[in-house]
């Protein structure tokens, strides 16, 4: 995508932020993203940032995508979360066999895909493909999608697990059950997806072995550097970017509120004159900046190497995962620091600070944010020992 086109998408999102901010409570109350918000995001070109050029996409550099996500999430945490999840799936579908890509985009270049990657179902190898069944939870934005990506182990006829794959299914092959009622990310509509003994042809299954090796069938038709990046770098960063955006939104809301706040317990002292409040703001700002700089620096480095045609260093991939989970931790720490100093009125329903606080903590429990696993992988690699994990 040209630099001018990239600026146009970011500029369009910037113009949309006040509307998304105004709809944040409506989004939470509805437990799903309003159709108008999805349509507005589509019109900016956001959902095509990581989509292949042959199907009308922009193949933008990944930092542009994460920057857009951060902006959206700074206005509404739920909208940013769903935008990030739905926005990264064109990248994942581009790794599938060319026939699968044609099925998804040949009739509609604006097709959207949701997902649930956790192994909550079971696939059995059949002639020409797989038989898939199961119930998958947490499919964010599924009401706005007509395809889904589902993770499950594959078993042979003897019941022996032989692979772990992501399966791509059209909406006719699954049903959605509305179960989403949570304390955070309430507006994401992350409902359950149910599949009952559906046949999935082999071209719509992608082995995690191929994904972890960065050698996938889709690269034959999508040879660009974007599609040579590791899944274990791109997707986890898709989870952290909106959380950093939520922290930024909380910071902006906190600073605006504190400018006018008078602290009743301190004889009418204005919060903006409180030196300790200033310290907390500085600490939070530093944590947010550090999280963002590490995430974007690492992804930039991977993308630069891919553009140069070089082999992606495994040590760099480990660093991406280390700093991705650290970025989430930094963002959560920043929001907690601000929330502690926001006063009792921040607890009221409808206030931005408490909504960002709940949304960010809800995002923190995503499996991609498990710090011990990521840190252990990094430490294992630092000692020169083999790392056996597909999410790197």
Image (spheres, rainbow, N blue to C red):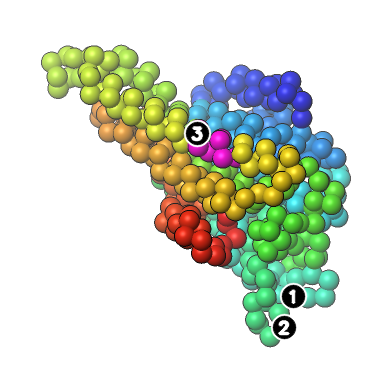
Secondary structure type for disc 3: helix
Q: Which residue is depicted at the point 83% across and 71% down?
A: 128
Residue 215: x percent and y percent?
74, 56
Residue 293: x percent and y percent?
50, 33
Magenta segment:
292-299
Residue 293 on the magenta span = yes
Q: Is residue 384 above or below residue 276?
A: below
**Image quadrant in which you'd find residue 150:** bottom right
Of pointers 1 and 3, the one earlier in the residue sequence? 1
- Reading the image, the residue beneath label 3 is 292
Q: Which residue is depicted at the point 68% across and 58% down?
A: 213
Tag in front: 3 or 2: 3
- C-alpha distance separating marks 3 and 2: 47 Å
| Residue at far bottom of view | 158
Q: Which mark is residue 157?
A: 2
Of pointers 3 and 2, the one earlier in the residue sequence? 2
Q: Is residue 69 above or below residue 366?
A: above
- Reading the image, the residue beneath label 1 is 125
**Image quadrant in which you'd find residue 343:** top left
Badge 1 crowding class, 10 Å Cα cut-off, few under 14, some 14 to 19, many 20 or more, is: many
Secondary structure type for disc 1: strand
Q: Which residue is depicted at the point 62% across and 46% down?
A: 234
- C-alpha distance separating marks 1 and 2: 7 Å
Q: Can residue 66 be seen at all in this image of the molecule?
A: yes
Of pointers 1 and 2, the one earlier in the residue sequence? 1
């Amino acid at each position: 995508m040209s630099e001018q086109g990239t600026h146009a998408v970011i500029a369009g999102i910037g113009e949309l932020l006040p509307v998304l901010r105004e709809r944040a409570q409506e989004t939470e109350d509805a437990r799903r993203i309003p159709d108008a918000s999805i349509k507005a995001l589509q019109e900016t070109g956001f959902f095509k940032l990581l989509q292949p050029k042959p199907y009308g996409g922009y193949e933008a550099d990944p930092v542009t995508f994460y920057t857009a996500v951060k902006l959206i999430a700074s206005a509404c945490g739920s909208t940013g979360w769903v935008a990030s999840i739905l926005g990264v799936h064109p990248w994942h579908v581009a790794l599938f066999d060319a026939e699968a890509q044609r099925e998804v985009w040949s009739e509609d270049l604006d097709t959207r895909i949701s997902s649930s990657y956790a192994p909550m179902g079971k696939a059995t190898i059949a002639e020409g493909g797989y038989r898939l069944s199961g119930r998958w939870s947490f499919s964010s934005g599924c009401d706005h999608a007509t395809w889904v990506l589902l993770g499950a182990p594959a078993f042979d006829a003897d019941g022996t697990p032989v692979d772990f794959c992501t399966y791509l299914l059209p909406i006719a092959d699954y049903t959605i059950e509305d179960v989403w009622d949570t304390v955070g990310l309430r507006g994401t509509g992350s409902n359950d997806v149910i599949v009952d003994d559906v046949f999935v042809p082999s071209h719509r299954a992608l082995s995690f072995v191929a994904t972890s090796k960065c050698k996938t069938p889709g690269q034959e038709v999508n040879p660009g550097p974007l599609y040579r990046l590791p899944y274990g770098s791109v997707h986890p960063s898709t989870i952290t970017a909106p959380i950093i955006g939520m922290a930024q939104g909380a910071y902006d809301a906190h600073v605006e509120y504190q400018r006018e706040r008078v602290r009743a317990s301190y004889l009418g002292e204005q919060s903006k004159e409180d030196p300790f409040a200033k310290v907390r703001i500085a600490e939070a700002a530093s944590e947010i900046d550090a999280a963002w700089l590490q995430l974007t620096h690492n992804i930039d480095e991977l993308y630069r190497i891919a553009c140069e045609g070089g082999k992606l260093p495994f040590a760099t991939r480990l660093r991406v995962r280390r700093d991705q989970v650290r970025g989430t931790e930094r963002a959560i720490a920043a929001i907690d620091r601000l929330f502690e100093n926001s006063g009792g009125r921040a607890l009221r329903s409808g206030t931005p600070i408490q909504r960002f606080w709940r949304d960010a903590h809800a995002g923190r429990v995503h499996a991609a944010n498990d710090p011990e696993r990521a840190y252990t992988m990094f430490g294992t690699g630092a000692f020169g020992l083999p790392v056996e994990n597909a999410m790197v």
